[in-house]
Image: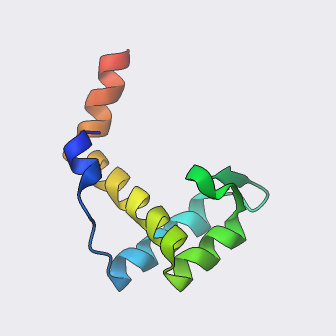
Amino acid sequence: MREKENSKKIEINEEMKELVIARVEAQVPSNLSLSIGNFGRMSKAKMLEHIRKGDGIGKKIIESHIRFLRAQSSGEVTRALVSVG
């Protein structure tokens, strides 16, 4: 993704929060733990807890999902994949 796009602050609203909760619940297996930046390894339950609280970690998770969705909808993800192949 473009660096300029990554540095923009995303205004998080309740709808975005609910969308990310639904994505995590549907796409992340319960037995999987992910490493999120310098926050260390985190379980699905812990990720959802941070998202629901809306704390710093939760906001970072929401922002990363929203950036990915925007890149996907703009065709940026497809262009990046095609350029590799």
Residue under the point 53% across and 75% down: 51
Residue 35 x, y percent position in the rendering: 65, 50
**Residue ID at (58%, 76%):** 50
Quarter of the image holding residue 83?
A: top left
Position of the N terminus, as image quadrant, is: top left
**Image position of 1 (left or right of 44):** left
68 to 47, vertically: above or below: above
Pick whichever, 50 or 20, lies toward us: 50
Is 82 on the left-hand or right-hand side of 8?
right
49 above or below 67?
below
Residue shown at 20%/45% (left/top)? Answer: 4
Residue 52 visible: yes
On the image, which quarter does residue 16 sit in? bottom left
**Residue 10 placement: quadrant:** bottom left
Query: The C terminus is located in which quarter?
Result: top left
Residue located farthest toward the right when viewing the structure as drawn: 31
